[in-house]
Image: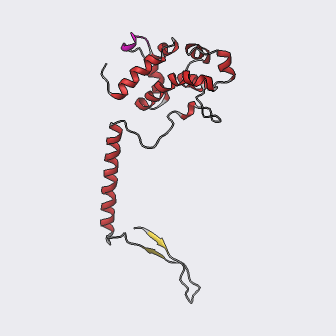
């Protein structure tokens, strides 16, 4: 039952504040309000499940924010490599980036376009599987659409876009 706090009443005995219950507008019974709340929560849960099945999202959010530099907000190559379980050098080279430059400044503005090619598949995998361990397992599993190669091998060969396309199609329900 909702509780409202009233202003303390002045009484002869030193007056303490009193708590009063306030009925909801249009319904004076507790059981009626409770039933209505349960019904509304049930409808909300049903609508949330429907939204999830459509892959619709609510408010905008940064997926895998832990892959971004805390100060600049840009994608950090070192964090991406660590997340994927690979060394920074092969990841940098696969993206056509100079390893020394990436090592010095892993979230430089000039690296962002290349890093987005890798981060987008990771975002999709996060949507499919959730935990990083599951994502790494998928990355290291041979895939028939990659001629039996793993997604990780394909990315490190400089073909992150191929992995991204397979995942985008799967996310959007496009048949292979």
Direction top: furthest residue: 147
* Residue in the image at 60% along x and 31% along y: 74
* Residue in the image at 55% along x and 13% along y: 94
Count of labels in the image: 0
Visible in this render: residue 40? yes
What sort of colour scheme is used for the picture? secondary structure
Horizontal side, residue 54 vs residue 158: left or right = left
Where does the N terminus fall, quadrant-wise?
Answer: bottom left
Q: Which residues are magenta?
A: 144-149
The front one of 115 and 135 is: 115
* Residue in the image at 54% along x and 34% along y: 65
Direction bottom: furthest residue: 12
Horizontal side, residue 60 vs residue 35: left or right = right
Visible in this render: residue 140? no
Where does the C terminus fall, quadrant-wise?
Answer: top left
Q: Is residue 160 magenta?
A: no
* Residue in the image at 34% along x and 53% along y: 41
Residue 169 pos. (x, y %): 36, 24
Horizontal side, residue 2 vs residue 158: left or right = left
Residue 167 pos. (x, y %): 40, 23
The image quarter containing residue 115 is: top right
Residue 80 pos. (x, y %): 56, 25
The image quarter containing residue 138 is: top left
Residue 85 pos. (x, y %): 55, 21
């Amino acid at each position: 039952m909702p509780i409202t706090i009233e202003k303390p009443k002045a009484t002869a005995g030193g007056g303490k504040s009193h708590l009063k219950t306030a009925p909801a507008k249009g319904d004076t019974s507790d059981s009626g309000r409770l039933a209505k709340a349960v019904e509304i929560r049930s409808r909300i849960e049903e609508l949330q499940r429907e939204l999830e099945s459509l892959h619709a999202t609510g408010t905008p959010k940064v997926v895998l924010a832990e892959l971004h530099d805390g100060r600049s907000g840009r994608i950090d190559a070192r964090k991406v490599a660590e997340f994927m379980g690979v060394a920074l050098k092969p990841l940098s080279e696969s993206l056509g980036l100079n390893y020394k430059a990436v090592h010095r400044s892993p979230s430089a503005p000039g690296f962002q376009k290349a890093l987005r090619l890798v981060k987008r598949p990771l975002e999709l995998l996060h949507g499919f599987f959730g935990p990083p361990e599951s994502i790494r397992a998928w990355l290291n599993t041979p895939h028939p659409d990659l001629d039996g190669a793993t997604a990780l091998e394909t990315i490190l060969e400089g073909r992150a876009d191929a992995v991204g396309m397979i995942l985008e199609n799967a996310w959007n329900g496009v048949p292979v």
